[in-house]
Image (spheres, coloured by chain):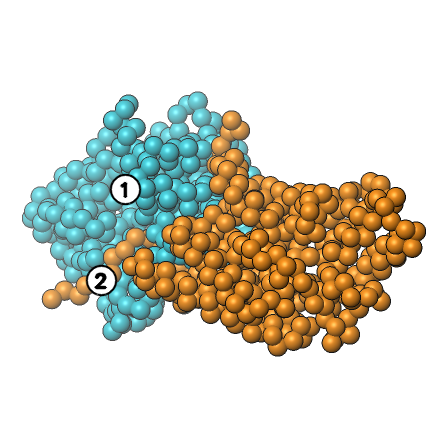
Amino acid sequence: MEKKFYVSGSPHIQTADSIPRIMYTVILTLVPAGIGAVYFFGLRALLIVIVAMISAVVTEAVAQAMMKRPLRISDGSALLTGLLVGYNVPVSVPLWMPAVGSLFAIAVGKMVFGGLGYNPMNPALLGRSFLLASWPTHMTIFRSAIPRGGTISGIDIMTEATPLNILKNSQVILKNPNDYTAEQLAQASDAIGKLYDSIDTLFIGRIGGCLGETSVVLLLIGASYLMYKRYIGWKIPFTYIGTVALLSWIFGGTAGLFSGNPLFHVLSGGLILGAFYMATDMVTTPITFKGRILFGIGCGVITVVIRQIGGYPEGVSYSILLMNLVTPLLDRWTRPKVFGGRTA
Amino acid sequence: MGLLNHSFSGGIHPPDFKKDTAFKSSVTCSPPPEVVIPVQQHIGAPSKPIVEKGANVSIGDPISESQGFVSVPAHASVSGTVKAVAARPHPFGTSELSVVIENDGENRWRDDVEYDEQYGKLGTKEILERIQRAGLAGMGGAAFPTHVKLSPPPNKKIDTLILNGAECEPYLTSDHRLMLEEPEKILKGMEILVKVLGAKTAAIGIENNKPDAVKIMRQTINKLKLPYRVYALHVKYPQGAEKQLIKSVVNRRVPAGGLPMDVGCVVQNVGTAAAVYDAVAYKKPLVERVVTVTGEGISESKNVRVPIGTSFQHLFEFCGGMTEGAGKIIMGGPMMGLAQSSLEAPVIKGTSGLVVFTEKQSHRQLEKPCISCAHCVDSCPMKLMPKMIGLLVQHERFDQLEDYHVLDCIECGSCAFVCPARINLVHLIKYGKAKVLQKQKQAG
């Protein structure tokens, strides 16, 4: 019998990159931040992350079985979502919370829409927002890195707050001088000064906050590898961070316009984690060049609006979720001009 | 050069797999026992056989004639007797009318194939006649009749001729070897092309992973005192695609839906240029070409000069035979080449290479859901959105495809190459194109 050959369509070669490779690489680049979390917050941090990851994977497996779909938990996407849910809670939460957060993130944030590739919103952020809305007190107790020598340039840790919390509270005091004593006003000014001086602490992460968001330097190490591998681009993180810096500089100060501290705002809160790891989630962000730029700018604007005017000190999660919803429209509006095409 | 080079947006960087054959001089294939010459090896109307079973032919004798303007004749590539004029396996996967010639082993050429000293005095009309009569078609792979490409309508003024020495497909090295081994022939062919087109400038684009070819072409240009320029292009697939080549060499964009002549350019493969010289100066028809036979599934990879119509079987035997685990034969390069089902199929005018893959290399992975990574959008050299086109085709929304410029896809395969979800984007896009064209035909 004549030898048979494989006959398939072109191309006949493909990149070695695959979905699991992308997912696991992203997980790997988040490990430094995780080690930092354990260093600053203790072994409980590791427990929280493990619980979140297990819950995510189990939820996906059960959902896929219920939907009579092939089991695809080995592609790493649920594991990554679980990891990010874990990174988005404070260390003091009861262990059932990351479990519930992951369950919600996977079941409602992803599986309900059809699984990987079909969800409109970032599942980890959806999980976090669910936790924040349902158990706000648990989600806003931030134990600072006390055992590791953490005061923020001498500010008392009795408030157990994040730098943005402290900034917001202090700015509220300064904006309403008639409601406070002279001593409180002085303390508020002093606090802001000390915060602005603590850039290095913010960079390293010896501050209060959620598990994975505090250490900027460790996050940046991971993010640079991802950018080198082109698993995340530069457009969204840089436009997002740039917009936050610019608008915080203009509107973020208490001494009128252009008195804000852009560096402080960029390094605080979940911005670095959000800009490099959440706002770059492939499924929920635009696929066009201009679309990505607009996405980054949009996230930046909403983040600053929430931080300055909104009730929360932190706006990253909501800004990304809101921009996720606008993504299909951005893709429609920013279709690239075909090579050799005329401008309409 | 270097940083000042133009390039095109998008594109990919597959590994080039050329080191197996880039340094091997072309060798002549052992004489095949028979050749199978299809009447259709080119884009356009098939040619019509003019010989019958039993006819005695010499190398270069026409065995079929053009049908209409966009058509070229075919010629005997071996001397011998016509065994049959019947359907035979064709590399396009079908069975096509072919002229089968049994090789008498005498290697007897036709009488009138000899050097014409006066060829420089030929007018455009005569040159084009010789080119068509020689059966020339684009040897880069697409096999578009050369005389047609060299006859743009009078309202399209051509000012630039570009020779395509990019050879951007992985594995292929036949153009590379041709530039190293016969640079003068290529350049003399280039002169003829410039004359026919009335072009003011001419250039050769060569990817700079072939520095030896760049050097030798430049040296030969200097030696022959020709005013042509060699561009050492940034290595990126698909640099050898016409529109992208024009963009990188003269920085002009062919209008969407248009042709190179719309921006005053004509592009020809270096192999075609050499064949033009043979056709015009020697009245030698296209009867042989250099084919890169390579891949992990062939025992001895080589660049082989082989008569048109030689079966893949014979060619592979000349290269030590396929290995035990051979699983796939690709005619052309791995990005755009056609997978073959029969070893009986023959080498045709556009067969630039035969890449043999092992079984293991031939396995395709399962398709996963699209994760909108946008690698396809980033890599598309025509700035399309392959993801969207693929999605629309899957949902049979053919009505929306023209909004996404589906007809401008050059089917280079960059999108499917980079897709981490292994989605068959080129397949989906080709299907979408066919549907749109069908609808246009019905409407118009």
Q: Chain of mark 1?
A: B
Residue A149 placement: quadrant: bottom right
Q: Do circles 1 and 2 both sit on a common chain? A: no
Q: Which of pointers 1 and 2 indicates the residue nearer the eye?
A: 2
Q: Residue furthest left?
A: B54
Q: In percent of the image, x 50 and y 55: which residue is there?
A: A123
Identity of the residue drawn at 81% across and 52% down: A170
Question: Which chain comes out orange in the rendered image?
Answer: A
Quarter of the picture holding the C terminus of chain B: top left
Residue type at tag 2: Phe
Badge 1 vs badge 2, beta-carbon distance below 8 Å: no
Residue B81 screen position, x and y as percent: 11, 52
| Residue B17 placement: quadrant | bottom left
- Decide: is A57 above or below A110: below
Most foreground residue, A313 or B47: A313
Identify the secondary structure beneath mark 2: loop
Circle 2 marks a residue in which chain? Answer: A
Colour chain B is painted in: cyan
> Can residue B255 be spotted in the picture?
yes
Is A137 on the left-hand or right-hand side of B287? right
Q: Amino acid at mark 1?
A: His
Residue A326 place in picture, x, y as percent: 53, 41
Q: Residues within 10 Å of mark 2 (few under 14, many from 20)?
A: some
Q: Residue at x 26, y 72 (%)?
A: B325
Q: Is residue A38 left or right of residue B397?
A: right
Residue B165 place in picture, x, y as percent: 46, 50
Residue at numbered disc 2: A5
Query: Viewed as shown, does residue B79 lie left or right of B193?
Result: left
Q: Is residue B225 visible?
A: no
In the rendered structure, find residue B42 and report the number of the disc placed on it.
Answer: 1
Query: What residue sits 27% from the left and 24% below the top?
Result: B443
